[in-house]
Image (cartoon, rainbow, N blue to C red):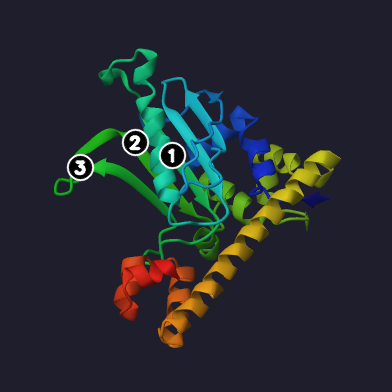
Amino acid sequence: MRYLDPKNDLTFKRIFGEHPHLLKSFLNAVMPLAEGKKIVSLAYLPAELVPEIPIFKNSIVDVRCVDEKGQQFIVEMQMLWTDSFKSRVLFNASKAYIRQVGKGIQYKGLQPVYSLNIINENFDNKSDNYLHHYKIIHTQEREKVIEGLEFIFIELPKFQSKNFTDKRLQVLWLRFLSEISDQQEGISSDFLDVPELKEASELILESALSKGELETYDKYWDSISTERTIRADSFETGLEQGIEQGIEQEKLIIVRNALNMGLSTPDIAKLTGLSEQDIERL
């Protein structure tokens, strides 16, 4: 039996966008939800297309749902990290929170919106943590929290590098996403021992997809490959322009490596002595 990569847009939505009990298992396992906020049941909301804003690319949210308490969850699988992604995440979650008022709900009745983002690239190289949980907190008294918006980012490569072998459901779901690759023959028996993961595994069997679905699956990988090529070509163009501008090639190589590592523009500026404007042009 051959398996397909669950991170592909088609397979990810097939698992989590069509089977609410699998999505519930995944969210309860992966999300840092307090005991009283665990999901009992959920319903899907229609995926939304963000308005055409230049910094927001590929703006269709993968999965949106609401649970029995009215809590909303926005789930995205992102293969490539971009500097604008956090802005897009904030935009989507804020819009979902604000729209509750439009339904006649008073401010005190607003329910939390959680944004879960699984990233297939490392973007925070200053931390060994693979899971990053953001809240609105008091900067000095950190136990004081404004409820409403929470953001979770998971770096899959960083998770995978830790070689977890325990069988907690959180670990198993993240192993499922990070370990299974395209056209893989056979998977870990750990996945087949848990009913939800066994079902998810059956959904990504190559034989379970139609010819049309397989074509869509392949087209998604083509689009990812094209985007990577464009990014690489764009950097090489910037490298050539930088040399023409008299910037030392050694510094340009440092910039390229730092960007690949996920360092921020201000940090790279401090490292190289270049201006932030020069780095952004590259």
Which image quadrant is residue 224 in? bottom right
Question: Is 156 left, or right, of 191 in this rendering?
Answer: left
Q: CA distance from mark 2 to mark 1?
A: 8 Å
Marks 2,1: beta carbons within 8 A: yes
Number of numbered tags placed on the structure image: 3
Task: Report the mark closest to the observer, 3 or 2.
Answer: 2
Question: Which tag, 3 or 1, sits closer to the chain's start?
Answer: 1
- Image coordinates for residue 44, horizontal then vertical, percent: 56, 25
Three-letter amino acid code at disc 2? Leu
Farthest residue to the top: give it. 104
Check disc 1 and report the residue beneath it. Answer: 115
Q: Is residue 265 visible?
A: yes
Q: Nearer the viewer, residue 265 or 234?
A: 234
Q: CA distance from mark 3 to mark 2?
A: 16 Å
- Image coordinates for residue 267, horizontal then vertical, percent: 32, 70
Check disc 3 and report the residue beneath it. Answer: 143
The residue under the point 37% across, 72% down is 278
Three-letter amino acid code at disc 3? Glu
* Quadrant containing the C terminus in the rendered view: bottom left
| Image position of 174 with respect to 160: above or below | above
Question: Is 149 left, or right, of 165 in this rendering?
Answer: left
Three-letter amino acid code at disc 1? Ser
What secondary structure is marked by label 2?
strand
Question: Which tag, 3 or 2, sits closer to the chain's start?
Answer: 3
Badge 3 crowding class, 10 Å Cα cut-off, few under 14, some 14 to 19, many 20 or more, is few
What secondary structure is marked by label 3?
loop
Residue 52, which numbered label? none
Residue 149, which numbered label? 2
Question: Is 13 left, or right, of 245 in this rendering?
Answer: right
What secondary structure is marked by label 1?
strand
- Image coordinates for residue 76, horizontal then vertical, percent: 53, 43
